[in-house]
Image (tube, rainbow, N blue to C red):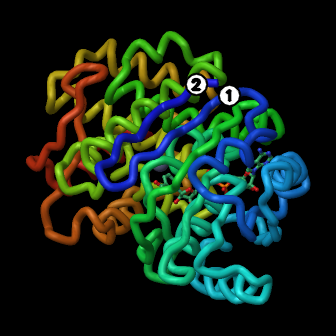
Amino acid sequence: MKVIEVPLVNAPYRVCVGVGLIGQVGELASGVVPPCRCAVVTDSNVGPLHGDALLGSLRGAGYDPVVLTVEAGEASKRMGEVERLCEEMIQAGLDRGSAVFALGGGVVGDLAGFVAAVFYRGVPHVQVPTTVVAQVDSAIGGKTGVNARGGKNLIGAFHQPRLVVADPAVLGTLPPREFNEGHAEIIKHAAIRDAGMLDALDNIEALVPRNIAIKAAIVAEDEFETAGVRALLNFGHTIGHGIEAAAGYGALLHGEAISLGLVAACRLSVARAGLPVEEAERVVEALGGFDLPLRLPSEISTGAVVEALKHDKKFLSGKVRFVLLERLGVARVDTGLTIRDLEEAVEGLR
Ligand SMILES: NC(=O)c1ccc[n+]([C@@H]2O[C@H](COP(=O)([O-])OP(=O)(O)OC[C@H]3O[C@@H](n4cnc5c(N)ncnc54)[C@H](O)[C@@H]3O)[C@@H](O)[C@H]2O)c1
Ligand SMILES: [Zn+2]
């Protein structure tokens, strides 16, 4: 087992990574969350596959879990589900002394984390991430929340988990498209912080802790995204989010849209920040290695992407804050780009 500390001043916690750890969550958690009546929030795909392993381990450690299942998919990340889960938890006898375990991908993690943030004004939660995205990214850092009609992740809270347990073995049941998708975030981490990882992309068991260490370090430096460092994690996400929205949510998986955003951001980095062309090409090749898209589908118009970009939270102040690479592994925030520059970069993806 590898242990990565997230050394936050007020609420430090550990991320435990290792094959088979899903069967030890109870034991690992009992040190930081006293055994109690607790909720296991999961989704309709993950529960049947991995629920029993988690429940067995929780019961073995003295917890008394009730399982709450949401429909798999992004649509479950909404306020209606927050209310339903809270009501069911009250019905099931949970109270301020209870805890929430999130078993699933980023949807379950964000939703269950937010429920934990607001139930009885906040109870402890443990993240047990089951997708590549969740293990290397969303389960760490304390950003929880749901979507609003007006946009993704607009309702939420910072609520750090007490513990994260990532078991790479559970990734074995992921459909290939979801498995590949998660590698867009891994390649993003490599690009901004750890170029050497681009030569080691074929071993997911080794990649998970390496990526968690990057995310944990950035979160520790900038817990509330006020110092600017955490913003570097948005590399590839400005144009990527625009493409994701323009395609219509669901048409492209998040990681697929981010792949295109990364390609565009690398090219802009060559033009504006002196990134060597061959370094940009290494990123593009790495994405291609996971069958991630490198060209914008013809049915997505540049105009639609630009319109979506203008609605992005990051543009509310009127200034474009865009992450560029100076070298592989060295990223910075740039404020000199215009919407017109981004439009050209989107056009360059054809
Ligand atoms: N909080 C953060 O910092 C943060 C960061 C990145 C992404 N996110 C959020 O994460 C969400 C995306 O997360 P995701 O990509 O994990 O999607 P997801 O949770 O929807 O999971 C993808 C699909 O895989 C299924 N699945 C999950 N684990 C499985 C397993 N082990 N075996 C078989 N099937 C499995 C799910 O049921 C779902 O159908 C988005 O809502 C995004 O906003 C949050
Ligand atoms: Zn992302």
Tell me: residue 124, above or below residue 252.
below
Q: Is the residue marked by circle 2 packed among few (<14), some (14-19), or many (20+) residues within 10 Å?
A: few
Residue position marked by numbered label 2 in the rendering: 2
**163 relative to 13 in the view: left or right:** right
Q: How many marks?
A: 2
Residue at (65% x, 81% y) in the render:
95
Examine the image and state in which quarter residue 91 appears: bottom right
As helix, strand or loop, the secondary structure at mark 2 comes to strand
Residue 31 is situated, as x and y percent measured from the top left of the image, at: 61, 47
Residue 7 is situated, as x and y percent measured from the top left of the image, at: 35, 41
The answer to whether any part of residue 5 appears in the image is yes
Quadrant containing the N terminus is: top right
**81 relative to 229 in the view: left or right:** right
As helix, strand or loop, the secondary structure at mark 1 comes to loop
Q: Determine contact: label 2, label 1, CB under 8 Å.
A: yes
| Three-letter amino acid code at the position of disc 2 | Lys
Residue position marked by numbered label 1 in the rendering: 18
| Three-letter amino acid code at the position of disc 1 | Gly
Q: Which residue is at the front of the view, 34 or 104?
A: 34
Examine the image and state in which quarter residue 205 appears: top right
| Mark toward the start of the polypeptide (2 vs 1) | 2
Give me the C-alpha separation between circle 2 and circle 1: 6 Å
Quadrant containing the C terminus is: top left
**194 relative to 335 in the view: left or right:** right
Examine the image and state in which quarter residue 224 appears: bottom left
Residue 214 is situated, as x and y percent measured from the top left of the image, at: 40, 31
Q: Which residue is at the front of the view, 222 or 176?
A: 222
Q: Is the residue marked by circle 1 packed among few (<14), some (14-19), or many (20+) residues within 10 Å?
A: some
Residue 200 is situated, as x and y percent measured from the top left of the image, at: 54, 13
